[in-house]
Every structure is written in C-alpha cells, then in structure tokens.
Image: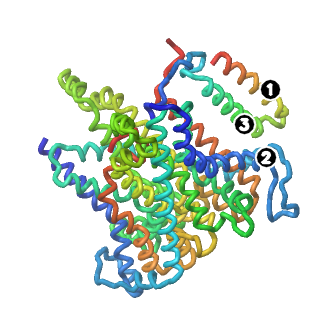
Amino acid sequence: MMAGIQPNKADRDGFLPIRTNGFDRGFISVVILILVHLLWMRFLEGLLPLWVATVLCLALAVFIIRKG
Amino acid sequence: MRRSGITSFILWVCLTILTLLPVWWMLVVSMRPRVKLYSKSVLIDDLYWDNFLAVLNSSTFLQYLWNSMVVATSNAALVCALGLLAAFGLSRFKISGGDNVFFWLITNRMAPPAVFLLPLFLLFTKWFVFGDFMLFDTKIGLILLYCVFNLPFAIWLLKGMLDGIPLELDEAARVDGATTGQVLSHVILPLARPGLAVTFILTWIFAWNEYLFAATLTSSAGARTVTTALAEYVSVTGTNWGEMAAMAFLTTLPALVVLGFVQKHIVTGLTFGALKG
Amino acid sequence: MRQSNIGWLFLAPATLILFVVGFLPFIYILYVGFFDWNTNAVDPTLRWAGLQNYRSLVFDTTFLNSLARTLVFAFFVVISELLLGYILARALMADRLWGRQFFRTIHTLPIVVAPIAVGATWRLLCVPGFGIVPYYLKLWFGIDYNISTNAYHAFGTAIIMDLWHWTPFVTLSLMAGLTALPKEPLEQAQIDGGNKLQIFWYVIVPMLKPVLLTTVFIRLMDALRSVDEIWMLTKGGPAEATRFIGLHIWINVFPKTDYGYGAAMSLLTLYVTIVLSWLLFVAMTGRKGGAQ
C-alpha cells in the first residue's frame, strides 16, 4: 500500500506543508469546508448566517486549489 | 546474551499464561454444573459436558450454526474467486487508473461498519426488493455484504502472491498458444493454490466472526449466525453462565483449529502486505 | 503487461460488488442525511431538511461525548499497544529463546477469536459476583472492582480487553519490521558509543517509522470502530462510560428509526475517521514538501 502511492509528476510544492496533487488539494478544501460549516453552526450561526461560511470556504478552496 | 534469553523466556511464559487465562476460564466455566458455578477455583474439577450438550441440542442454535457455516463458506469461496480474478487483472495487465481503483478497493476494508449499518439496512429493506424477495434477513444478503471487508483483504493477499509468480511462465504459455483464460487456469491457478488456501481460511474466519452486520441485517432463524446467537443468549438469560461459556467456546473453536496454519500469514494480511510476517 | 481492456474485465466483478455494498451506501446516506425521515412519525416519508440534522448534531452532547470518548479510548489503546508490542517483540527476538514458535502461535490466538466471543469471555472474567477478577482483586489487594457500577473500572477494562485482543498483532508486525532492519547502522551506532536509549531513539525509531505508522494506522482504524466486544462486556455502560461511537450509532438509530438523523450521525463519524486516516496516510507516505 505504501509503495504504490509514490509522489509523481503531478505533485507540486505550494504553500501547504506537504507536497500535493490535484486530488489532495480538492480533498483538503472539502475537509476544511465541512469543518468550518460544523463549527460555524455550533458557535457563530447566531451572529452571522451560514452562507458567509460557504462563501469564505469556497474562496479558500479556490485559493488552495490554485496555489496549494 | 544468555541473561536476556532467560528474562525473555520468563516474560513470555507469564504472557502466555495471561493470553490463555480468559480462554481457559471460558473452558472451565463451560464444564461446571450449575451448583458449582460460583466456585472461584481456576481448575477444571471434573469433565461435565451437559452445558455443551444443552447448547448443541437446541435446534435454534444448530440452525444458527448451519447458517454461519453456509455464510462463511460461500463468502470465502466467492471472495477467493473474485479476488483471484481481480488480482490477476491487477498483477498482469496495465490498467489505466488501476492504482486508483486498487486504492479504492482497499479503503473499503478500513470503513467503520457502524457507519454503513443504516444505509445498508435501508438498501436491504427498501431497494433490493424483488417481488416477495428482499435481501434483508437472507443468507445471500450476508454473503454479499461480507465482501466489503473480505474482498479487499483477499485482493491484497492474492495480488502479493501473483506478483511473486514470474511473468516468464505466462509468456512461455502464451508462446505455446494459450489464451488468457488458459494462462489463468493452467499456469496461475496451480501455483496460487497455497495462497488461495490461506486466503480462504482467513476470510472464512473473518466472516464467521462478524457480528454487527449479522445482528442488524437479519431477524429470523433462517439467516442469523452463531455470533448473534451468543449475543442474544446474553441478553435473554443473564445468569446461565455455563451454557453461555459453552456457546462462546463453540464460537471460538474454528479459530483455535486453524490457528497454527494461519499465524504466519496473519500479519501480512492485516497490514495489507505492508509487512511480511 | 498487456492491454488494459481485458484487465478491466477481470477487475469488473470485484469492483461491481464493492460498488454495491461499499459505495452505494455511502451515496445513499449522503442523500438521506439532508432529509427528515422517521418511519414512526406521523409523516413517514422523506421531507427535505437541509442542514437541520447536522445543526442538531453539533449540539448533541451525548453524541459529541461519545465521539470524544472514542478518541480517548483509541489514543490510550494505540499508545499502550505500541509500547507493549515493542517490548514483547524485542523479547521474542532474544537470541536464545526456548520455544519461540510455541509462544508465537499462542500469542496469535487472540487475533483470530471472534470479537463477540472475546467480549463474552471477558464478561465471564469480570462480571461482579461471578468472575474471578473481582473476586481475587478483593481477596488479595482489597480493591472493590466493579465494572457495572464504576465508570473508570469499565473504561479501564475495555482498554485492557483491547490490549489482550490486539497487542499480539502489534507485536507480530513490529517484529516483522525489526527483523527486516539492516544490521549495519545498528552496529555502527554501537561502535560510535551510543547508549541503548540513544540507539533506540536516533537509529531504530527512524528506521522503523514506516512500520510504526502502518501499525498505528491499522490499529487506530480498528479501535475507532470497536463495537462487538464492548457490547458484550458492558453494553456501553455503566451509564454511558463505555459507549463508543459505533455502539452509540447502533443502539440509537435502530430503535428510534430516526433515519435522517442517524445518517447525519454516521456521516460525521465517517468524516472524523477519514480525516484521521488521511493525516496518518500523509505522514506514512512521508510527503514532506513546502520548504525546499
């Protein structure tokens, strides 16, 4: 399992602390999106509506996928 | 290093006792009549088989035992056949996106079963319904379901073994005019036989041991397995420890039988070949 | 290596089955999680609920506590098993060990025993009034050990049971890793005058890192999903002291038939599992990047 997943040509170094490929960056974006939404619902939804979180996360996702 | 040898020996003797103690206690309890049940001695005082006889005379338990046999054997056979085909495909052909498919196949084993209970329950009761037949509460349902964790396991184990069979043998057979199917049946299959045996036994044990899916996705004596019998027994009669121990021992028995045979391969299997035992 | 289309043909049956029993359920709960669906309610059909299930879930303290409890359990179990397993692996590799094969075989036994039988066995050992463990602890050490009233005892017993069940696996895999280590760096370090602790920390651990991470990965995934043993041992009690997340889902969703909420619960658990395993996987493949 370990040997099969070697870094290949599509991988690159961005601002993220690990070498990533397109799938990794998409995955990280989705993970962050879900996490932020859950925390937002728990702590912030009384103050700011949820779509703010969505907008913020999508912006972050674009940034991660482009530059990560 | 003589001293270290003796320390290790003592350590391992103690450890062996600790490992065996729970199993031994189970055996002791299963051989005690009701009146002696609360004795705290850890020795078997006489051979008393009534607990085993009581369990084995219960027709429900025998039915469950039969179900477990059918489910485990069919599942292991299915998994070995499909696993061999898949491993052959992965090992002998260049498949575009093969690595990703392989990775996805393997992740299936890591998924927590409790998470999939609900969707599987709903699919089995509401979707896979053909006329009067529904997959819920059938042996076929369990046989298919156990592929979730057994098939990735088998594919990995078998792929490792097929990768070890030299490609030259295939090529030689092909030069002699063998088709792909003949290569598989006449070259690969005979050489993979020991590997298949190990895979069969291990997947059989895993299918036999499974509880959560069996408990949730079956409801009648027609499909429930030994592990659910044990769990049911505990909730029905909390205090008949002798029979419960006998039942637990019977559930453990297959594992005890194959232990010596599988112990060399179990680490390789459980770590998906990352480590050779 | 031959052309790919025939290869797919061989792969197809396995892929098809895993698609049906592995992938379809995932898509299905993803869908159900956004609905309000309770077959025992006045309206037993699916009604669109948006994120409402998840909204209640992040305020559900029973669920969150159970999740946290599972993580604590997994942490303790994995750490202790690594330590114990390492010591035992070294002991099993001692130069002169009489009966090595015998010990190894006996040690493998717990791995293949059905989890449900493990739970039943430990229940026989530990149940108050019947088992020998409470009896002898009281007799020899004067400890009042009771897994059905004392939350700490129950939690501790769950950990010890898991140690019994899975330390053998860690021992065997670490042993496989240790046997495969090259000898030269170790000898070199000894010549250079490193003491045992230094050799362990600076030579063995780095070389063993892939094996350690693989073992942690597999054990962690198993610890996060243990249900059967705990169910037999304590039924999640006393109160909720040993109700780990898998058990929580199991004993909550089915009697209540609140499928939408159950789906959300399952998905959130899956999310935590996936994130944890991905982090470990990244560490495992060692993809250090960023700073060149």
- The residue located at (59%, 50%) in the rendering is C17
Reply above or below: B43 against A17: below
Question: Residue placed farthest to the top in the image?
Answer: C292
Left/right of residue C143 with respect to residue A39 in the rendered view: left
Secondary structure of the residue carrying tag 3 is helix
Q: Point out which mark residue C34 bears.
A: 2
Q: Position of residue B11 (x, y in %)?
A: 24, 52
Q: Calculate the distance from the C-alpha at mark 3 to the C-alpha at mark 1.
A: 15 Å
- Farthest-out residue, front: B177
Q: State which mark lies toward you, 1 or 2.
A: 2
Q: Chain of mark 1?
A: A
The percent coordinates of residue C272 (x first, y second) are 61, 41
Q: Which comes sooner in the sequence, label 3 or label 1?
A: 3
Quarter of the image for residue C248 reads bottom right
Does residue B132 lie above or below A12 as drawn?
below
Q: Quadrant of the N terminus of chain B?
A: top left
Horizontal arrangement in the rendering, residue B225 relative to residue C58 (left or right)? left
User: How many dots with numbers?
Assistant: 3
Pointer 3 residue = A39
Please, which colouring scheme is shown? rainbow
Find disc 1 in the rendering and name its residue.
Answer: A55
Q: Is residue C75 visible?
A: no
Check disc 3 and give the amino acid type: Leu
